[in-house]
Image (cartoon, rainbow, N blue to C red):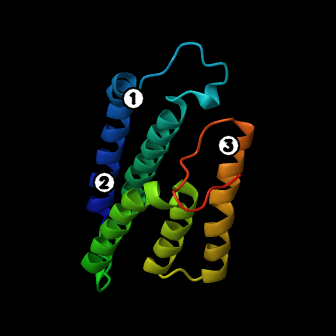
Amino acid sequence: MSRTSHFHVGIAALVFAGFLAVFGIRYGVSSPSNVSNIVLSPTFWPYVVAGLIGLSGLGLVLSARGAAAGEAEEPRPEGGWMRLMIMAALMVGYVLLTPVLGLVWTSMLAFIGLAFLIRTDHPKSAFLAAILVPLALYLFFAHVAGMAVPQGAFVRLP
């Protein structure tokens, strides 16, 4: 990406994060007032995501300021639009398969699909992470936090 692209995307990310923090989460996510643990509050993680988006935007703006003015634009990789369409199909498939397979199994498949779509240099690590991360998250949310994780129609986790 060029210097101006970094700057524009960074500004857009900062505006979006600000909108989420000020209006979107406050009026779009309802949270009961009697939540004992802040991490279990329905508004906690959206605010974390908004903060991360804001930090990413700030990083892009700062990197655009620090980049050399005469820096040449990087060449665009071949097949970018095709990968974007495959990514969109992967997201639609994730939404459609979640009720059938459950959140954990669908997340595993989506992680593996994304790892191969971006042509990772570490396929073994990506495969291990695709299996272990959704399972660890399931164990935490289902057994430690006591929250229901959507299960599929075929295989149910304990």
Answer with left or right where residue 106 lies relative to residue 5: right
* Residue at point 42%, 62% (across, down): 97
Secondary-structure class at tag 3: helix
Q: Distance of mark 1 from mark 3, alpha carbons? A: 25 Å
Q: Which residue is mark 2?
A: 9
Precedes in sequence: disc 1 or disc 3: 1
Q: Amino acid at mark 2?
A: Val
Of badges 3 and 2, nearer the viewer stands 3
Answer with left or right where residue 88 lies relative to residue 43: left
Nearer-the-camera pick, 46 or 90:
90
Rendering coords of residue 61 (x, y %): 38, 51
Secondary-structure class at tag 2: helix
Rendering coords of residue 83 (x, y %): 32, 77
Q: Amino acid at mark 3?
A: Ala
Contact, mark 1 vs mark 3 (Cβ under 8 Å): no
Of badges 1 and 2, nearer the viewer stands 1
Rendering coords of residue 118 (x, y %): 45, 77
Q: Quadrant of residue 122?
A: bottom right
Q: Which residue is mark 3?
A: 142
Of badges 1 and 3, nearer the viewer stands 3
* Residue at point 66%, 51% (across, down): 137
Secondary-structure class at tag 1: helix
Would you say residue 1 is visible in this rendering? no
Precedes in sequence: disc 3 or disc 2: 2
